[in-house]
Amino acid sequence: MNTITPFQPYTSNINCGPGQPPPRPAVPDCYTKEQALDALLKAEGDANEARSDFRVIQGNLKGDEALKDATEQFLRVLYQEGTNYTSLAQKDYEMIGNFLKPGETRKDAVDQFLKLMKAEGNRDDAVSDYILINRYVSPKETREQATDQFMRLLYKVGTGYTNQAQNNFILIH
């Protein structure tokens, strides 16, 4: 018997409406929603938090963004925050989505946020850095370039001196 893992590629076109047989891995949309919820439940270990996560993810889908991709990015944020901090992960996920630039993928934006989290060692400074970078990134540079520049400034002054790094970043922008 084949086991179905989360986010398995689609292989058929069965409808998934009422009265239809249970979806196979290939069923678009409804199966992906089920898989996403399963992945969230596995991560959270709590059905209410998993459902809350699912609503946040669905409410923040951008354009043609796939639910699978969005869920994967949410899980990256959740795991970095820690599963005991679901509401903070949800807020950060929404913030990242609200600041997406045209042509920027959520994965690219999450990469930069997680880079800041790792460097700072705490969420508050990382969020503050992310918002600052978003405000000052020029149309001529990517968020990644601006984040890398900020990180260089941060490492020069030391990670305990976030305000100094932020002030230096503002000064050169």
Image: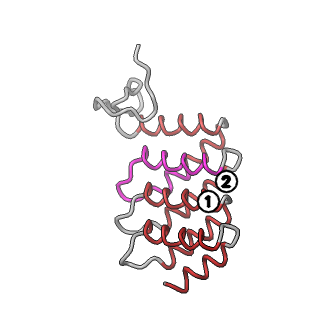
Q: Is 78 within the magenta?
A: yes
The residue located at (35%, 37%) in the rendering is 28
In what element is the residue under mark 1?
helix
From this viewpoint, which residue is outermost toward the front?
Answer: 156
Label disc, if present, on residue 130 of the rendered structure: none
Mark 2: amino acid? Ser
**Going by the picture, which residue comes out furthest to the top?**
1
| Nearer to me, 45 or 121 | 121
**Residue 127 image point, x, y percent:** 61, 66
Query: According to the image, label 2 marks what residue?
Result: 87
Dominant secondary-structure state across the stretch colored magenta: helix
Residue 169 location, quadrant = bottom right
Which label was assigned to residue 91?
A: 1
Q: How is the image coloured?
A: secondary structure
Q: Is residue 140 left or right of residue 170?
A: left
Q: Are marks 1 and 2 in contact (CB under 8 Å)?
A: yes
Quarter residue 95 falls in = bottom right
**Alpha-carbon span between mark 1 and mark 2:** 6 Å
Q: Position of 19 compared to 152: left or right? A: left
Pointer 2 local density, CA inside 10 Å: few below 14, some 14–19, many at least 20: some
Report the front residue among 127 and 115: 115
Mark 1 neighbour density, 10 Å: few (under 14) some (14–19) many (20 or more): few
Q: Assess whether residue 87 is covered by the magenta stretch.
A: no
x and y percentages locating residue 150 in the rendered image: 53, 72
Q: Looking at the picture, how far across and down is residue 111, in whole percent? A: 48, 56
Q: What amino acid type is highlighted by mark number 1?
A: Lys
Q: Residue at x 55, y 83 (%)?
A: 170
The magenta stretch spans which residues?
56-81
Residue at image position (53%, 34%) is: 38
User: Would residue 66 be found to the left or right of residue 54 on screen?
Assistant: left
Vertical side of 51 occupied by 97: above or below: below
